[in-house]
Amino acid sequence: MTTTMAVRRGPGDVVLTGAAVLSAFGRGMTALADGLDAGAPAFRPVDRFDVTARRVGVAAAVPGSPALTDELVRVVDEACDEAKLSAAERSGAPLFLALHGDPALARVAEADRRRHSSTAFTAALAATTGLATDLPLGAGIRAYTSACVAASTAVADAAAAIARGELDRVVVAGGYLVDADQFSLFDAGRALSTDGQVRPFSEGRRGLLLGDGVGAVVVESAAAARDRGVPALARLAGWGRAGDAYHPCQPHPEGAGLARAVTAALRRAGIGPEALGYVNAHGSGTAQSDVAEAAALRIALGEHAATVPVSSTKSLHGQALEASGVLELIVTLHALRTGRLPVNAGFLAADEHCPLHLVLDGFTAATPSYALTLNAAFGGANTALLVGSA
């Protein structure tokens, strides 16, 4: 049965016109696509910092010690170039940036900390890349630090402002590079997988593993893109956000908030669950989160939750914290445009509490018209972004 839902959106359609990325597979879309298609996880021993005192010594990281600022500048420039933004168009585009914070903050003198706030870091990046720095409060630079939903929240905010006609375009970026501080925090909290793999929705899963992720997308009104003669990579057809209000760390066991976010994204696009061709799940590989997410999909998608292909690519590129939303949006964009749905790696055996149609044994060839990417975070925050063919 085909479901038609009441459309909830502003007066203008929203599209993606540029994207650029760094992942544990390397710099650029080609490296990411090759890694996803190969289906081999990028986890390896950490050599960026000392892990000899840690329970776990594995992450998904590019070789060496890349600098977050440099990588963010590169992806913002590449995304703007793909979107064919002129210098003048850049100067009118706000930057919404998702990050844990200025990497220098923890080690500067107290008197200098204001200069190293997340907002100050975002303003400096906007100035370096030629983006807007003098728009009215709320329409210009914004820093998002809300854990694993930071980047997806930024994308949803950008899309909403564009749909309402308040802005023509926004550059959304996010960055996380595996660092000693966050690594030790997750290790001490016993959240990291002790067998060197992330196994979303699988029996025997033992937790998450961190991974590098830096990405940027240009979110634009369809009318503005047409006026510039720039083709869209995809439509940002819907978005939804909801909170659990359940527990500081644990998700609602029935996935109530995530289900509402998915339903809101579908309703905004005016489509039913049967139109979905792929779900890029949050899929952290932790016991409680995966069960809650599977429950959320059953609530939001009904009988279609058993048939729509699902995978969590955190099993390949790791957990990129605040940058997860933009990295996984770009992964979902790859799946939508190429028809190659990435594998849910690390799978050992079915978990009766996660009865989903997982992509296993290599990528699946498909022709999805719509694909959904999900994120969830500590504090019970949940986001859903729905992309559709251009």
Image (cartoon, grey):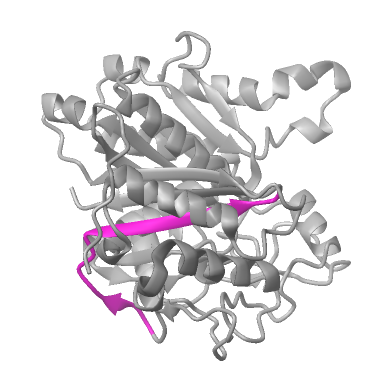
Residue 365: in magenta span: yes
Q: How many marks?
A: 0
Residue 348: in magenta span: no
Query: Would residue 138 be seen by someone viewing this image from the given angle?
Result: yes
Residue at 36% from the left image edge and 15% from the top image edge: 91
Q: What percent of the width, then of the height, locates residue 27?
A: 43, 53
Observer-nearest of 131 and 203: 203
* Residue numbers of the magenta segment: 362-378
Q: Is residue 208 above or below residue 252?
A: below
Observer-nearest of 269 and 290: 269
Q: What percent of the width, then of the height, locates residue 271?
A: 26, 53
Q: What percent of the width, then of the height, locates residue 246?
A: 72, 52
- Residue 54's image quarter? bottom right
Judge left or right: residue 307 versus residue 281: left
Q: Is residue 30 above or below residue 236?
A: below
Residue at 55% from the left image edge and 69% from the top image edge: 295
Judge left or right: residue 108 versus residue 43: right
Q: In this view, does 236 lie above or below 24?
A: above
Query: Would residue 342 be seen by someone viewing this image from the given angle?
Result: no
Residue at 21% from the left image edge and 60% from the top image edge: 369
The N terminus, quarter of image: bottom left
Residue at 28% from the left image edge and 66% from the top image edge: 274
Judge left or right: residue 354 versus residue 378: left
Q: What percent of the width, then of the height, locates residue 358?
A: 43, 79
Find the residue positioned furthest to the bottom. Answer: 349
Observer-nearest of 248 and 25: 248
